[in-house]
Image (cartoon, rainbow, N blue to C red):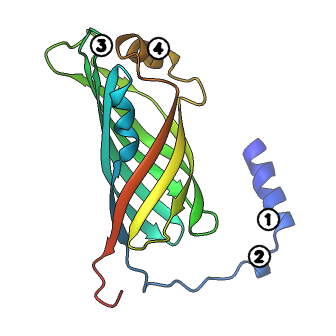
Amino acid sequence: MKCLVVVIIIFAIIPLSSIQAQECDYSFLPEFWVFADVACVDALWSKHISLEAGISVSLAPGIEVEIPVTYMLDRSGGKEQLFEFILSLKYYPWESGPFIACSMAHVCMFVGPYKPLEKFHCLNELHFGYTATWFAPFIIEASLSLRDPSDTFTDSRAYIAALVPGYSRFRFHLRAGYRFSFDKSR
């Protein structure tokens, strides 16, 4: 009953005559960019090594899907190794520059000879950042990631952080990459 009332209110507020079919631009070709996180230089003074690389695909102007893969190695004594696979949706409100990204899938997996009992963990992540395209086709991107912003997976995050002390809730990323397209006219 509530659903029916909501639908009736929506149709009462928005007249059907104002909803028009929009022209679709099918000339947009996706752009790709490959990147590596150069903020891994913190391994010189911290007790973990964190390496990240990935690929990103622009689906429409201002919307990208990216797949970063991160490898973390604990050097504080446990020698646990962690792989992170993330599928995230990135939105640029002004089609370039500042962005917000949300993970659609985030899987952490312990690998190597020192695997704990619970090998697989699921999390979520939120990124806020800025993409600089001043030296196109080369790209620099700075972002701050917040792991598990809704505190949904507190047990998994605490379990990973206990085994890999460098796995914090906040992480700064500085990515360098190269953007390319398969369109010959660009």
Residue toward you, 186 or 125: 186
Number of residues whose C-alpha sits closer than 10 Å to that of mark 1, classed few (under 14), some (14–19) or many (20 or more) = few
Taking the image as shown, residue 7 lies to the left or right of residue 154, namely: right
Q: What residue type is labelled 3?
A: Glu
Q: What is the quadrant of the N terminus in the image?
A: top right
In the image, 77 versus 56, the foreground residue is 77
Q: Can residue 1 be seen in this view?
A: no
Q: Which of marks 2 and 1 is nearer the N terminus?
A: 1
Sequence-earlier tag: 4 or 1: 1
Instruction: Rate crowding at label 3 as few (under 14), some (14 to 19) or many (20 or more) other CA atoms within 10 Å.
Output: few
Q: Mark 1 points at which residue?
A: 11
Q: In which quarter of the image is residue 184?
A: bottom left
Q: In x, y percent, where is residue 15?
A: 82, 74
User: Which residue: 44% across, 72% down?
Assistant: 135
- In this view, the residue farthest toward the bottom is 185
Q: Is 66 rendered above or below residue 94?
A: above
Mark 3 lies on a secondary structure that is loop
Q: Residues within 10 Å of mark 4 (few under 14, many from 20)?
A: some
* Residue underneath mark 4: 158
Q: Which of marks 4 and 2 is nearer the N terminus?
A: 2
Q: Gap in Å between the C-alphas at discs 1 and 3?
A: 50 Å
Residue 13 figure quarter: bottom right
Q: Which mark is residue 16?
A: 2
In the picture, measured across the screen, residue 157 lies left or right of residue 94, that is left
Which of discs 4 and 2 lies nearer the camera? The answer is 4
- SS under mark 4: helix
Q: Distance between the residues labelled 2 and 3?
A: 53 Å
Residue appearing at x 38%, y 56% in the figure = 176
Q: Say which residue label 3 marks.
A: 118
